[in-house]
Image (cartoon, rainbow, N blue to C red):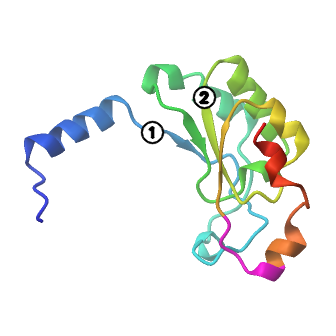
Amino acid sequence: MEISYTSEEYLNFLEGSYQNPVVLVEISSICNFHCIYCVSRTKAREKGFMSQDLFEHIIYQLPKITPYPVRLHIDGEPTVHPKFYEYGKLLNRLDIPFVLATNGSRLSQDLLDLKMEVLISISTHREEFQQRTIHIDYDVLYI
């Protein structure tokens, strides 16, 4: 089946995407894993954490941009950011829904305070996962 990029259906999809985009925010370009699909470690750009000023500048604009949850991920592991919990609480206070994409290695009981959707993606070597993962019972996260 050939896709027509001029079909009415596709053009309607594009229009809807422009009017209600999905926003992805990379608060950390640093990761504590070396997943086999990730090209982050091959990129020459400097690694680091998003400042609180920039984070706030972005999130205060979100309600005007999209009704969809902001997605915290991209190149790094969001939970290694020293202010991850604080950023999550701010999103909650502002009633901005968010999705955390994580390797799950830094999930902890205190994160249960955050209202968020969690997507855990693990594509690393078994030895690395066992070595770097905080040993918690993931079943407790389904409260």
Going by the numbered disc 1, the residue's amino acid type is Val
Residue identifier under label 1: 22
The quarter holding residue 16 reads top left
Q: Which mark is residue 86?
A: none
Q: Is residue 120 above or below residue 87?
A: below
Magenta region includes residue 123: yes
| Left or right relative to 8: residue 118 | right
Structural crowding at the residue carrying mark 1, measured as other residues with C-alpha within 10 Å and reported as few (<14), some (14–19) or many (≥20): some
Q: Secondary structure at mark 1?
A: loop
Q: Is residue 12 above or below residue 67?
A: below
Could you say whether the residue bearing mark 2 is in a helix, strand or loop? loop
- Measured as percent of width and height from the top left, residue 60 is found at 59, 22
Q: Residue 97 bears which disc, if any?
A: 2
Quadrant in which residue 89 is drawn: top right
Which tag is nearer the camera, tag 2 or tag 1?
2
Instruction: State which quarter of the image contains the N terminus.
Output: bottom left
Stretch in magenta: 122-127
Prevalent SS, magenta region: loop
